[in-house]
Amino acid sequence: MHAYTSSRISLPSRSAQPNLPEAFEPALLQPL
């Protein structure tokens, strides 16, 4: 069960990681 939960969190975690920096980069550049 633990392995299943870890795999599930790993998938969304990786997707959120690239999304955060991508959204932050343009957001910071816009105001600057």
Image (cartoon, rainbow, N blue to C red):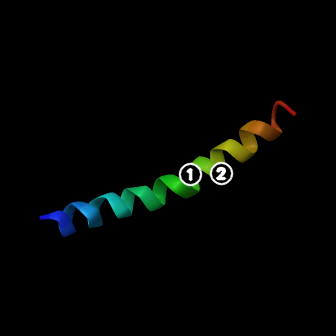
The number of numbered discs placed on residues in the rendered structure image is: 2
Q: Closest to the observer: 31 or 10? A: 10
Amino acid type at image mark 1: Asn
On the rendered image, what quadrant is the C terminus found in?
Answer: top right
Residue 27 lies in quadrant: top right
Label 1: which secondary element: helix
Q: Is residue 16 left or right of residue 4?
A: right
Residue ID at (53%, 55%) = 17
Q: Position of residue 29 (x, y in %)?
A: 82, 40
Residue 11 lies in quadrant: bottom left
Callouts 1 and 2 close, C-beta under 8 Å:
yes
Q: Is residue 26 left or right of residue 9?
A: right
Query: Which circle marks residue 22 in the picture?
Result: 2
Residue 31 lies in quadrant: top right
Q: Position of residue 8 (x, y in %)?
A: 27, 61
Q: Is residue 7 left or right of residue 24?
A: left
Residue tagged by mark 1?
Answer: 19
Q: Position of residue 3 (x, y in %)?
A: 20, 69
Amino acid type at image mark 2: Glu
